[in-house]
Image: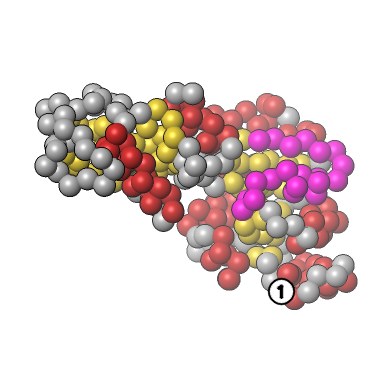
Amino acid sequence: MDWLRALQHLRATRTPGVIVTIAEVRGHAPRAAGAKLVVAADRTWGSIGGGNLEETAVRRARVLLRDAATCATTQTHDLSDRAPTEHGVQCCGGQVRLLYEPVPVRRSVAVFGMGHVGLELALLLSRHDLELHLVDSRADQLADDRLAPVLTGPADVRVHRVPVLPELVVADLPVGTDVLVLTHDHAEDLALLDALLRSDVPGSIGLIGSSAKWTRFRARLAGLGHDATAIARVHTPIGDPAVSGKEPARIALAVAVELLTTSGAARLEA
């Protein structure tokens, strides 16, 4: 598997990795500038020349993985028998500068309910590098022509057409998914919240609605056996209060701003 297919594999399996590229060569080196190595926690693909250089690069990349680094960094390595090494000697006589680019797992967001607000929210989120799950029990809300603008952005959009029991989709979501519940039906909202609170999948759970709605839901969730700690996982109301207005596009903007500027942990503590 070459480095490009390796990257596709990591993305498909939601595995973090690091791309190591020879950015610059001075003098002699085992590979030319542009050679790439992809490093995961337990495997590598491609090569930047083997030997001490590659072993050092792999270990450096795995430190970045361990630290969950997100910023690219560079490091210069001398290929001389006089240069200090940890993993053997390479005496090509040159010098290389390596570029380390972390490739974290993409954030996953699920929107349950593709009505007016849901569609506007999907349009905004689709412009970001996300794995975006769109779920609705109404076939017309997920029609191809309606979703066409959502599919033009960089997001990897997954459409779930579930005419009954949309809560079953929860089990198919990646662990850590930020879930937003805004369906057309309060009974469906409640069923979804019940399924989400019984699952370890969600990174966060957001519910659209008023304080009165939440008062009723909180009592019903308690009646379904959820304790106060579990119920507190639900964040409601959703949306950055700095964005005011009740138009669907403004509500969606408020939700997108909050989602994209805070972490799931921060929302759960709100």
Would residue 238 appear left or right of 189 to someone viewing this image? Answer: left
Whether 124 is among the magenta residues is no
**Could you tell me which secondary element the residue under label 1 belongs to?**
helix
Residue displayed at 20% across by 41% down = 77
Q: Residues within 10 Å of mark 1 (few under 14, many from 20)?
A: few
Residue displayed at 25% across by 25% down = 31
Would residue 146 appear left or right of 136 to someone viewing this image? Answer: left
- The stretch of residues the image draws in magenta is 158-177
Residue 39 percent across, percent down from the top left = 42, 38
- The three-letter code of the residue at mark 1 reads Thr
Of the pair 248 and 191, the residue shown nearer to us:
191
Residue displayed at 69% across by 35% down = 159
Q: How many marks?
A: 1
- In the image, residue 109 sits, relative to residue 268, either above or below, namely above
Residue displayed at 68% across by 31% down = 146
Residue 128 percent across, percent down from the top left = 49, 41
Residue denoted by label 1: 229
Residue 266 percent across, percent down from the top left = 53, 66
Would residue 13 appear left or right of 228 to someone viewing this image? Answer: left
Of the pair 229 and 256, the residue shown nearer to us:
229
Would residue 256 appear left or right of 172 to someone viewing this image? Answer: left
- In the image, residue 21 sits, relative to residue 226, either above or below, namely above
* Residue 171 visible in the snapshot: yes
Q: Quadrant of residue 61?
A: top left
- Quadrant in which the C terminus appears: bottom right
Whether 167 is among the magenta residues is yes
Q: Quadrant of residue 254?
A: bottom right
Residue 185 percent across, percent down from the top left = 82, 52
Q: Residue furthest bottom?
A: 228
